[in-house]
Image (cartoon, rainbow, N blue to C red):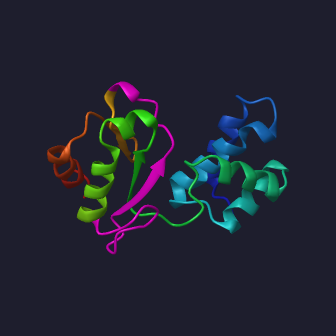
Amino acid sequence: MLSTEEIKAIDAERAHYPTAQAVGIEAMKIVQHHRGWVSDESLREIAEYLGLSVESLDGAATFYNLIFRRPVGKHVILICDSVSCWIMGYEQLREQLQTELKIGLGETTQDGRFTLLPSCCLGACERAPVMVVDQDLHGDLDSEKIGEILAGYE
């Protein structure tokens, strides 16, 4: 069941959109903010509240890579694998993150601290290679910065 706080936030967003369909992604982001991810049950609750089909919401959720349909760690790392980041050292950065975190892409560390996900573009090509941890963009990455950045997220 959607919480009172979630409903209040969804209603506030709904006022800015012309249709219930248009507010679907924002509603999923709100629920994800409160619950950490969007489960099948959460998806049904949102669909029922907005009067939408579960299938249409699920289609949007699986297309939009910032909606997490599986549980994730406390901190989510999105590593950019765009052409710019590939040219500027994506592979080395990815390998270093996987080695330090002892996980592969799409996995969560055993302590639940980090989830590492690829992203097709983070829109910061001028700072490549880049990654986002939670809401924080980190650019011009090199091997020395990775450890410092990870240490900043307890």
Which residue reaches farthest front? 87
* Magenta extent: 101-126
Residue drawn 33% across and 64% down? 113
Q: Quadrant of residue 45?
A: bottom right
Task: Judge from the rendering whether residue 140 lies leftward or rightward of residue 106; answer left or right.
Answer: left
Please provide percent x and percent y for residue 97.
Answer: 29, 57
The answer, for residue 139, to whether it is visible in the render is yes
Q: Image height check: is 101 above or below 14?
A: below
Q: Image height check: is 142 above or below 153?
A: above
Q: 38 or 146: which is nearer to us?
A: 146
Q: Considering the whole magenta stretch, tell me its main secondary structure.
A: loop
The answer to whether residue 96 is magenta is no
Which residue reaches farthest bottom? 110
Please provide percent x and percent y for residue 1.
Answer: 69, 64
Residue drawn 72% across and 36% down? 14
The answer to whether residue 113 is magenta is yes
The answer, for residue 5, to whether it is visible in the render is no
How many numbered badges does the structure rendering display? Answer: 0
